[in-house]
Image (cartoon, rainbow, N blue to C red):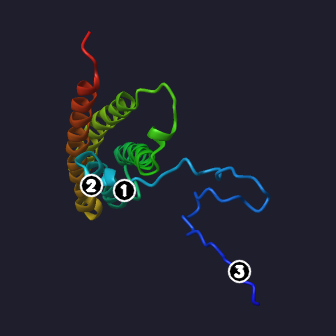
Amino acid sequence: MMTETVVTVQPNQGPNNNAAKPDGTNQPGALSWLKINLDYYRTMPGQIKLVELVFGIICMSLASPAYLSGTHWFLFVVTISFIGTLIWTFVYLLGIREALNLHIDWLLSELVNTGICTVLYAIAFIVQLAVWTPAYPRYRAVNLAAGCFGLFNTLVYGFGAYLLYIEWKSTRTPQ
């Protein structure tokens, strides 16, 4: 008589499955708390962040290299705002807000960041346009275009700050 062997196969559920690791432990990986959240970028605030990043790249590429001191200020503001927006983009993309149990008012901190970026962008695009209007004809058109895109990004940051303010105000409990 032949013996019969039964093998039960369980499907692999990716890197976060509960199977034991080769060393015998059953602990999740170091970055298992991160979850990719692409649904945020289907919302209006997510799309605004992407537009801010695209306009920031356009401003940086049009205003580089900086020939005048006003353009140095403009590029400083654009770069700092770009880095801040990029950090917030990764916070939402990786779900860091939901994963960390810190006592941080995330909406208020993002609102303050976006509001500061709006004010700095407004000052920077005015400086950029004022410096390049009477300046060198060879590089004037590109730098004036950078200032115009700075104006557009100021409006986008302002609209993003407005949406964040509305959302922050709606989450506050009346006292």
Residue extending furthest bottom?
1
Name the residue beneath numbered marker 1.
38
Q: Amino acid at mark 1?
A: Leu
Name the residue beneath numbered marker 3.
5
- Tell me if I can see residue 42 in this picture: yes
Q: Nearer the viewer, residue 67 or 116?
A: 116
Look at the picture and state if 52 lies above or below 117: below
Q: Which mark, residue 42? A: 2
Q: Amino acid at mark 3?
A: Thr
Figure quadrant of the C terminus: top left
Residue 93 location (% of width, % of height)? 42, 51
- Tell me if I can see residue 134 in this picture: no
Where residue 42 sits, quadrant-wise, is bottom left
Tag 1, which secondary structure?
loop
**Separation (CA) of disc 2 from disc 1:** 7 Å
In the image: residue 97, left or right of residue 163: right
Tag 3, which secondary structure?
loop
Query: Tags 2 and 1 in contact by the CB under 8 Å rule?
Result: yes
Q: Nearer the viewer, residue 134 or 98?
A: 98
Tag 2, which secondary structure?
helix
| 3 vs 1, front mark | 3
Residue 59 location (% of width, % of height)? 31, 55
Look at the picture and state if 172 lies above or below 96: above
Figure quadrant of the N terminus: bottom right
Residue extending furthest front?
1
Please tell me which of labels 3 and 2 falls first in the chain: 3
